[in-house]
Image: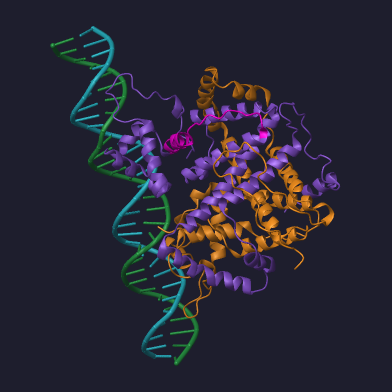
Chain colours: A purple, B orange, C green, D cyan
Amino acid sequence: MAAVSDSKPIIWMRPEKPARGPAPTHSRGQIAAVAIDIADSEGIEAASVRAIAKRLGTGAMTLYRYLPAKEDLYTVMIDEATGFEPQEPTGDLRADLTTLAHRRRQIFLRHPWLAPLLATRPIMGPNFMRGMERDLAVLAGCGLGMDETVDVLNLIHSWVGGAVQAELTERANADRSGVDRHAWRLRMEPYLKSLLATGEFPHLSRMVQVSEIGEADERFENGLAIILDGIEARFSTATGTNGARRPVGDTDGGPPATRRATVQRAARSSTTE
Amino acid sequence: MAAVSDSKPIIWMRPEKPARGPAPTHSRGQIAAVAIDIADSEGIEAASVRAIAKRLGTGAMTLYRYLPAKEDLYTVMIDEATGFEPQEPTGDLRADLTTLAHRRRQIFLRHPWLAPLLATRPIMGPNFMRGMERDLAVLAGCGLGMDETVDVLNLIHSWVGGAVQAELTERANADRSGVDRHAWRLRMEPYLKSLLATGEFPHLSRMVQVSEIGEADERFENGLAIILDGIEARFSTATGTNGARRPVGDTDGGPPATRRATVQRAARSSTTE
DNA sequence: CTAAAATTGCGTACACCGTACTCGGTCAGG
DNA sequence: CCTGACCGAGTACGGTGTACGCAATTTTAG
């Protein structure tokens, strides 16, 4: 069982219109749009082949004339939902990265199924490629070199993905309506109380009492700010100056951080179990 | 369709041993171990109820005496695979966070199914809670206050999750053995070539030529270094002095929406144990 | 204009999934 | 002892993705 359909050209190279037979009634884009609609409102697992076909008023097997496998449906759904929005580079790295991160988060919030799907597949759809090209262009406009750009983009993408997934799970949990939600609390609370009552979790207990769980927006902003600080600290971005890349284990002389080399070696050796 | 089993106490509160009847032949832990074994070697979707039962030499429905729903199986699998490893705080924030991040990454790499599952559910298993407690303790040992700790932990967890998922997808793709892999390249390459040939992707083209895709280890290290720089830049933790927290959003040029972010939570003293 | 070829729509069927229901065997408490 | 709780497990149901086959439709060749 392969992740993508076996043999045959990739889905993006298949011509939409046949050369000889009758004209197709539907299109990949249309099918994807319906699937996205269902997935957005009822969850990704509700976007079954039969359900999509029913909405389109056709038979289930018809869809396989357009998409050779369910995995290909996911592929086009992802690319369709990702869409493409242009972004003009302002030259200010921090501002541009902020815009970039926010746009990405908004897309993920709009399609709660998107982040998990995107995170577990290699995607190369045209929209995705256009987005990549745009991001590269934006960062190039900020004076970053190619390698720096790749690192920074990797970092932002990974973090936004992880952060929004956390946000979405929490939201999905909070969205349980009425009775359902109440029942969940009823089931969960005695367990948590019993755990904390053991006294084995002093820090956790204190956290529950002391620290308020901030809004998702605020937490995203906090995390982003820290990351941007790190990026600025590592790459000199003073509007246009092509910053030389500094080696990883070596930080600026800003905060008097103590012996970095030993720190890293120690950390490495501790990863084994 | 609820994410967790409806009504009834949470899985962790169910007693393993019955009060009255005959003793159970198996246990939740044993079932979870088998499921993890299957998922590690054949993928999570191979860990079906029937497959697990077959390995245990019992009927499929038997498992439902131990786990009321498949979702509960996932719950115990996650908690079991997460495990618990102690970590002594050294007091050096950078070193401790590095250790923490590396440990987390290693766990995710050991169980490729874990990151996606963990990212999409609220988890409160005992191992997870112990891990949380340990992380809080470690960061408290570095002189961070509760709110700072929560932010930092959030950031690290989100990023490690996102980064490792990206790494895993790439690895899964590279792991396709022999013919399969070759076939995939054969199908993919003409598409990519045709895309780049349009001339619409100058930056992407240059990236493909110029920039080598680094090893996963190296990329992880790079990302982590940047994040740690950010954390050190924001929270002055050098040699234990508890510093003031800088506000977040003092840059201009961000998108007009969602821009209200500031860390308005008052810094709380971390001295009161 | 007609016949062949290509292609679509789609019903049927199959294997697999999670799991509700059921029932007989087994053990502990009265 | 008996009674009731509990375990193991077979059967069955509704769901999934999809392989196969066939009639209908359109395009092309002669």
Point out residue B254 in the picture as x, y percentages from the top left corner: 60, 38
Point out residue B45 in the picture as x, y percentages from the top left corner: 49, 49
Was residue A76 drawn as part of the magenta stretch in this picture?
A: yes
Q: Residue at x 63, y 24 (%)?
A: B208
Residue A36 left/right relative to C10 = right
Q: Nearer the viewer, residue B120 or A177?
A: A177
Please indicate, yes or no, whether residue B85 appears anywhere in the rendered image: no
Kindly indicate the quadrant of the structure image that contains residue A178. Answer: bottom left
- The quadrant of the picture occupied by the C terminus of chain B is bottom right
Q: Residue at x 38, y 32 (%)?
A: A29
Q: Nearer the viewer, residue A91 or B132?
A: A91
In this rendering, the answer to whether A95 lies above or below B73 is above
Residue B58 left/right relative to B225 = left
In this rendering, the answer to whether A272 lies above or below D24 is below
In this rendering, the answer to whether B142 lies above or below A80 is below
Number of marks present in the image shown: 0
Residue A109 left/right relative to B86 = left
Q: Residue at x 60, y 51 (%)?
A: A218
Point out residue B98 in the picture as x, y percentages from the top left corner: 74, 49
Q: Nearer the viewer, residue B166 or A182?
A: A182
- The quadrant of the picture occupied by the N terminus of chain B is bottom left
Kindly indicate the quadrant of the structure image that contains residue A22. Answer: top left
| Residues in magenta, as a range | A71-93
Was residue A63 drawn as part of the magenta stretch in this picture?
A: no
Residue A97 left/right relative to A123 = right
In this rendering, the answer to whether A188 lies above or below D22 is below
Kindly indicate the quadrant of the structure image that contains residue A69. Answer: top left
Please indicate, yes or no, whether residue A146 appears anywhere in the rendered image: yes
Q: Residue at x 47, y 65 (%)?
A: A184
Point out residue A195 in the picture as x, y percentages from the top left corner: 61, 71
